[in-house]
Image (cartoon, grey):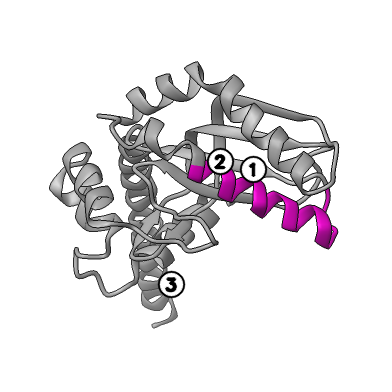
Amino acid sequence: MRFIDKRKFFALFMLLILSFTLLISYAKATGSDIADSVLRLHIIANSDNTADQNLKLAVRDRILRETKEIFENSKSASDAARLAEENTAFIKEIAEAEILAQGFNYPVSVTIEETAFPTRVYADIALPSGRYNAVRVKIGDAKGQNWWCVMYPPLCFTDGILCASDKSKSQLATSLSADEYALITGKDCGAIPVEVRFKIVEIFQNLF
């Protein structure tokens, strides 16, 4: 009897391993397509003190506000990345102007590069962990907490409101397969919420 129980346990264990392997493989493939469809915004504060964190948010709001016209007519994430590359000096000027307006004199660097991001939820859209092209804004020593959002399609507004407009959703939908879009918007009717599924995959990816 014990031998039978051990065999059942082993079969169940192998089934779980296979299930998670397939889940991770699927998530990687899907995550790659999703990563190619968005341009992230990544702002790193000088430090974690309150003043520096508030400054980070002020810089965020001004960048989103003053670059809106640049990215609103982008046709794809690669198009948005090209525009960001062409406007790095302008984005830097915006950040520097806001930093001075807030009474600080921190240096700023702005680069367009591939960056690792954790699973994030924006309103009713979840993006899996992975490596995404991003506009990275480093303030001062850049040792404070990060702030993430999406510049294309725009999934964030100023004043700290995270939101996905109908236009943003439409842009994502045209860049992804129907299954991929249903997955990130939670419309695939799975029993486990999409952000939880992405987080489980993220944990197993970090473990193995």
Question: Is label 1 in contact with label 2 (beta carbons under 8 Å)?
Answer: yes
Asked whether 132 or 207 is in front, the reply is 132
Residue sitting nearer the eye, 185 or 32? 185
Query: How far apart, in angstroms, are the residues tagged by discs 1 and 2?
Result: 10 Å
Q: Which amino acid type is marked by label 1? A: Ile
Q: Which residue occupies 42% across, 50% down?
A: 128
Q: Earlier in the sequence, mark 1 or mark 2?
A: 1
Pointer 3 or 1: first along the chain:
3
Quarter of the image with the N terminus in it: bottom left
Q: Nearer the viewer, residue 28 or 123?
A: 123
Q: Which residue is mark 3?
A: 6
Residue located beneath label 2 in the image: 63
Q: Quadrant of residue 115?
A: top right
Q: Residues within 10 Å of mark 2 (few under 14, many from 20)?
A: many
Who's the residue at 82% across and 36% down the image?
A: 140
Magenta extent:
47-65
The percent position of residue 53, horizontal first and vertical second, equals 75, 56
Report which quarter residue 141 is drawn in.
Answer: top right
